[in-house]
Image (tube, rainbow, N blue to C red):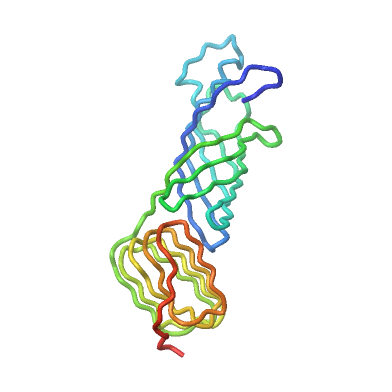
Amino acid sequence: MFPTNGKAYPVYALSLNARMFMKPKVGWEVALDVISKQAIWGYRVEVEKTQWKIMQFGIYAGYLLPLNQFHFVVGMGAYVRDFYNPDGLLYHRVGMRYYLKNGVYFNLVLKSHWGKADYVEWGVGYKINQGHGYGDFILSGTADNTTIRITSNGFGDASNFKTANQLIVISNTPVSSKINADGAAATVEIEGSGNVIYVGTPQSMNVIQYGTGMGIQSVEFPAVQ
């Protein structure tokens, strides 16, 4: 908090986030926030305070707009523990993050209470990819539009599944997967270390890398016509 012509106070915060992407450009996150805002010591000075009592806990939900390794975020939270309530119940965030391929990301966000700026959050975080089992899968057939989300730790083979128009693949796995991109407008988002191998000649191919995996074109030609 930086009051005009006043003393500057530090703020210490920890956020635990969980996120999900429904589409390559649409995501949501929820978070538990733990905040120690030292400026609260100057609020109602006649009231006795301790470091434990000035600590605020909040729950937060936000919208994510990923653009390659940048994520733009806007959202709202509510304090579930705030002994002194200096700013009201609700708080807001707007800002951005930059993700490295090793899972580390940098955070720059403005925290506010409606139209009143509170402080700028800047820091560093780490993204943990969560897998879901070890089963392999094989897809075959055809569709006009296809979205494939891969979160297992097993091998996925959709090289015999033909998509006529839009193909979206979101891969969060440590193993490689194979898809048929022939003739499709394809978007591949890679969050894990596994590669996405595509066969055929796509109408267009947009590979977005958040993890260390890569999008690789295979020399094989898809069997499904």
Q: Tell which of 92 and 217 is nearer to you.
A: 217
| 54 lies above or below 181 | above
Q: Position of residue 104 (x, y in %)?
A: 44, 46
Q: Among all residues in the image, which is located at the extreme left?
A: 134
Q: Tell which of 82 and 217 is nearer to you.
A: 217
Q: Position of residue 212 (x, y in %)?
A: 40, 58
Quarter occupied by the N terminus = top right
Tally the marks: 0
| 169 lies above or below 223 | above
Q: Position of residue 59 (x, y in %)?
A: 51, 39
Q: Is residue 29 left or right of residue 72?
A: left
Residue under the point 29% across and 68% down: 135
Quadrant in the picture for residue 199: bottom left
Q: Position of residue 143 (x, y in %)?
A: 50, 82
Residue under the point 56% across and 47% down: 62
Q: Among all residues in the image, which is located at the extreme bottom?
A: 225
| 168 lies above or below 99 | below
Q: Tell which of 185 and 44 is nearer to you.
A: 185
Q: Among all residues in the image, which is located at the extreme front?
A: 219
Q: Is residue 89 left or right of residue 221?
A: right
Quadrant in the picture for residue 23: bottom right
